[in-house]
Image (cartoon, grey):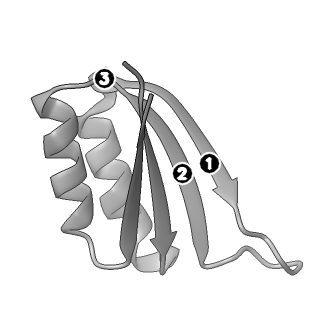
Amino acid sequence: MTKILGIKLTDKIDNAVKLQSILTKFNCIIKLRIGINNKQTIFCSDSGIILLEVEEGNSSIDLEKELTDIEGIEIQRMIF
């Protein structure tokens, strides 16, 4: 089974460090990470999307919970 997490991050200035800290903590279960920057002007956007392929199990549930504790993060899940 393949589990993909779509993470929409808003307010990157305040939340990026928290997000990166959590992703580092759970790096052993992350198989793939793709970042999509919503650059619409010559300046960087304050939001973005990250796609993660993660291993199934309790650790991925813990990862989702910690991510949802950050204000300004929305998570969508795809399971194949």
- Residue depicted at 49% across the width and 77% down the height: 10
| Foreground residue among 75 and 32 | 75
Specify the amino acid type for callout 1: Gly
- Left or right of 35: which side holds 61? left
Specify the amino acid type for callout 3: Glu
- Left or right of 25: which side holds 35? right
How far apart marks 2 and 3 lie (CA) works out to 16 Å
Q: Is residue 8 above or below residue 33?
A: below
Residue receiving disc 3: 55
Crowding near the residue tagged with mark 1, few <14, some 14–19, many ≥20 C-alpha atoms within 10 Å: few
Q: Quadrant of residue 55?
A: top left
Residue receiving disc 2: 50
Q: Contact, CB < 8 Å: mark 1 with mark 2?
A: yes
- Residue depicted at 10% across the width and 31% down the height: 58
Residue receiving disc 1: 35
- Quadrant (top left/top right/bottom left/bottom right) for the C terminus: top left
Q: Is residue 75 above or below residue 59?
A: below
Q: What element does badge 2 sit on?
A: strand
Q: Is residue 65 above or below residue 34?
A: below
Q: Quadrant of residue 7?
A: bottom left
Earlier in the chain: of badge 2 and badge 3, it is 2
- Left or right of 12: which side holds 75? left
- Residue depicted at 47% across the width and 38% down the height: 52
Specify the amino acid type for callout 2: Ile
Please tell me whether mark 2 or mark 3 is closer to you in this view. Answer: 3
- Left or right of 10: which side holds 18? left
